[in-house]
Amino acid sequence: MSAKPEPFDAIILGAGGAGLMCAAIAGQRGKRVLVIDHADEPGKKILISGGGRCNFTNVHTAADRYLSANPHFAKSALARYTPADFLALVETYGIAWHEKTLGQLFCDGSARQIVAMLLDECARGDVEVALGAPASDIDHGDGQYRVCFGGRQAVAPALVIATGGPSIPKMGATDFAYGLARRFGLSIVEPRPALVPLTLGPDEQLFRDLSGVAAPVVARCGKTRFAEAALFTHRGLSGPAILQISSYWRHGEPIGINFLPDQQRGWLVAAKRQRPRVSLRGALSGLLPDRLVQALAQRLPPVAELGGLTDALLNEVEAQFADWQFAPTGTEGFAKAEVTIGGIATAGLSSQTMMANKLLGLYAIGEAVDVTGWLGGYNFQWAWASGAAAGRAL
Ligand code: FDA
């Protein structure tokens, strides 16, 4: 270890989206910034995001698309660094992009362009990025934070926790942020996997046999609903609608799935009037994938002809299709979760600057904080916005 600590204005732990954005902005404001990451490459989650094309923001960004113990916390940062701000940066770098669905913006080319852009922005601010160097022996005294890394020692009046959450540990994700935050007096909202596939138990084996079948649905948990595709897997349920609803799901709660969200109310009775000799399976075929029709029909009373059933019974069957109940046994856990819900409690942070209320110079940004977005570019927008908020304040 070097004998003499090297002085910086800010030490940022974590070279992900939030840390790099924060570093670039602070560096370009003339601050001497050091970013430390234990990974051998920066922005690994950016690189794998959006199937390699990085869904870098969502034009519909608003605080109500984020989960947090304080639903108002994200408003200030999101308002001061918007999707348009990030897009302007993307365009400055000539990175081609497109809108996919639901306001989701992706690179036409590769997520590597986003990482290269952030690194270039850091370089313009003379930021030092130290990779492959776990941070250790972090302490605070006399208004200075001290960090050891890679045989060196750095000191600064500001320390930014940007080490993300524990989702996808095989990529180097850790719960390091929580331990460090606790040591400095911040509390943690219980972390749990989010945007994650749900598992089904043996009672629902029928559906597990449908592995690979997808359908557009409306998935519901309590009063929250998402209209997107659901996908059956060999373990349970996945696809965007399920990933979205998983963030709202708690153990023991049922998930309701409307398999026929585009059908008008009373469609089954109408089908009986038009085709009384048709079977239930016949009425469903063409509306849903065949394998799904077979599986669902096995769970219903055998229906030879719609004409043989009362309207009341058909309305009951229709209601079942509109809110088919599943009882997930769990989630596929942090190993498969796109993000972590919970984290460093916002109650201890300033929503303007992301600095701890009770400890001068300590900041927390990005996924490490208890702010979790919907699927579709919202989480990166939070990383940019919270990183920018801290970067302007450092
Ligand atoms: P992030 O996790 O990106 O960065 C933290 C950094 O800290 C990492 O570089 C890590 O190596 C480092 N670190 C961790 N522990 C450390 C330690 N002890 N010491 C030093 N360094 C440490 N979101 C979105 O909006 N659009 C999308 O398309 C996707 N797609 C997507 C796909 C997949 C497969 C995943 C897993 C996630 C997504 N996401 C996403 C979510 C998005 O990737 C996530 O919200 C952001 O990367 C969070 O950015 P942060 O900078 O906060 O953490």
Image (cartoon, helix red, strand yellow):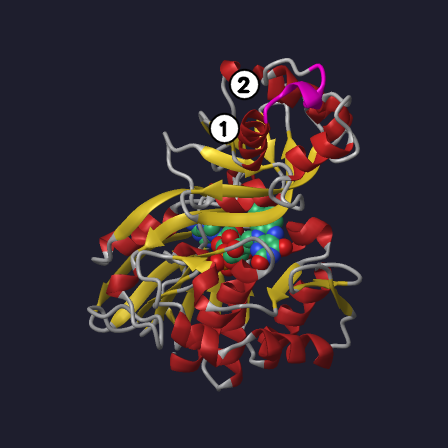
| Residue 120 in view (yes/no) | yes
Instruction: Rate crowding at label 2 as few (under 14), some (14 to 19) or many (20 or more) other CA atoms within 10 Å.
Output: some
Residues drawn in magenta: 304-310
Reading the image, the residue beneath label 1 is 326
Dot 1 and dot 2 residues touching (CB under 8 Å): yes
**Is the shortest distance between ligand 1 and the CB of mark 1 under 8 Å?**
no
Q: Quadrant of the C terminus?
A: bottom left
Residue 105 among those drawn in magenta: no
Tell me, for residue 25, which label it has, or none: none
Going by the image, does 79 lie left or right of 142? Answer: right
Amino acid marked by disc 2: Glu
Q: Who comes first in sequence, dot 1 or dot 2?
A: 2
For label 1, the SS is: strand
- Is residue 306 found inside the magenta-colored segment of the image? yes
Q: Quadrant of the N terminus?
A: bottom left
For the point 20% across and 57% down, the residue is: 185
